[in-house]
Amino acid sequence: MDRDADRIDWNQLRAFLATVEAGSLSGAARRLGLTQPTLGRQVAALEAALQVTLFERVGRSLSLTQAGRDMLAPLHAMNEAVELVSLLASRQSQSVEGLVRITASDVYARHVLPPVLARLRREAPGIVIDVVASNEVEDLMRRRADIAIRHVPPREAELIARRCPDSSARLYATPAYLESVGRPATSQALALADFIGFSESVDVLLGELRRHGLPLGKKNFPILSNSGLVAWDLVRRGMGIGIMMDVVARRTPEVVDAWPDFSGVPVPTWLATHRELRTSARIRLVFDVLADCLLHPAGADDN
């Protein structure tokens, strides 16, 4: 690229084009919201950068030179291109059509998101939702998703987060399984039952249940899974007792509360997204619908 072209400023080109269209520096200055001296300096700087004379100055009048006339056609094309880019960007930012990726744990994706997706289909049929079932907190930062539902607050300054109402994790099992172990009603009786645990956090779960008075050991966890969805399915099939958030258990008619005296474990819920939320209408709409459904889960079930 020519080094002189590298020094050309679009503001200078726009000042020249406005001067031609307005017929004077004063008229161009009013059109662009500039002072006349400022606009005059921009035109002069363009002439210096291009090393050509664009206007012949006769008294207070301006006459376009041949070099100036030669520039008009490509400049009009450039101006139209800039306006088109601006229009496309505006349409993109305000469009409620296109792809939005939501990442959530496999359990949330299976049991909590379906009514949200049904509502989005009604309210914004032009949006395509890609559900990324994942427990990785880094999904947003890796740009694998636009919105994340997580149970830990995001720590990155680039993200926007909203705290949703907490869930409560309690113990659940099928009525048949509870009957098979004598329908335990006390912590001592529960110590004889089998529990379904999570491979990567069984020690944390064991410690939490002990803290609540259950005298359990690792022998109580004969089946583990790295998938919350698989673990919950095993509970639904009567393989043992599992811990699960009430927002999921309410959507699982096969299970009942295995220990009504258990106060439960609070589970925080966060919605997080990129700062693009401020400029993208479709991401804002999906974010707001998610927030509303998580705030009013019963209403989401009814939709």
Image (tube, rainbow, N blue to C red):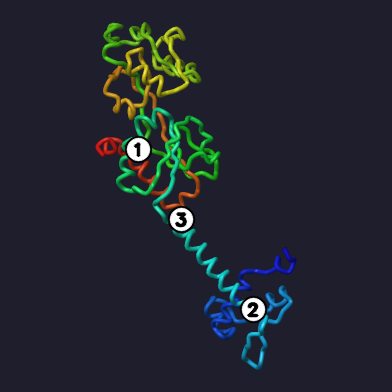
Residue 300 percent coordinates (x, y): 29, 38
Q: Earlier in the sequence, mark 2 or mark 1?
A: 2
Mark 1 to mark 3 CA distance (whole Å): 27 Å
Mark 2 to mark 1 CA distance (whole Å): 62 Å
Mark 2 to mark 3 CA distance (whole Å): 35 Å
Q: On the rendered structure, is 176 left or right of 99?
A: left
Q: Name the residue tied to disc 1.
A: 294
Residue 84 percent coordinates (x, y): 50, 64
Q: Name the residue tied to disc 3.
A: 92
Evaluate if marks 2 and 3 touch, with contact meaning CB atoms under 8 Å apart: no
Q: Quadrant of residue 13?
A: bottom right
- Dot 1 amino acid type: Leu
Of tags 2 and 1, the one toward the viewer is: 2
Residue 121 percent coordinates (x, y): 32, 44
The residue lying at 68 percent from left, 75 percent from top is 46
Q: Quadrant of residue 158?
A: top right
Q: How many marks?
A: 3
Taking depth in this image into account, of 257 and 68 the one nearest to the observer is: 68
Quarter of the image containing the N terminus?
Answer: bottom right
Of tags 1 and 3, the one toward the viewer is: 3
The residue lying at 55 percent from left, 44 percent from top is 157
Compared with 235, 89 (above or below) is below
- Dot 2 amino acid type: Asp
Of tags 2 and 3, the one toward the viewer is: 2
Q: Name the residue tied to disc 2.
A: 70
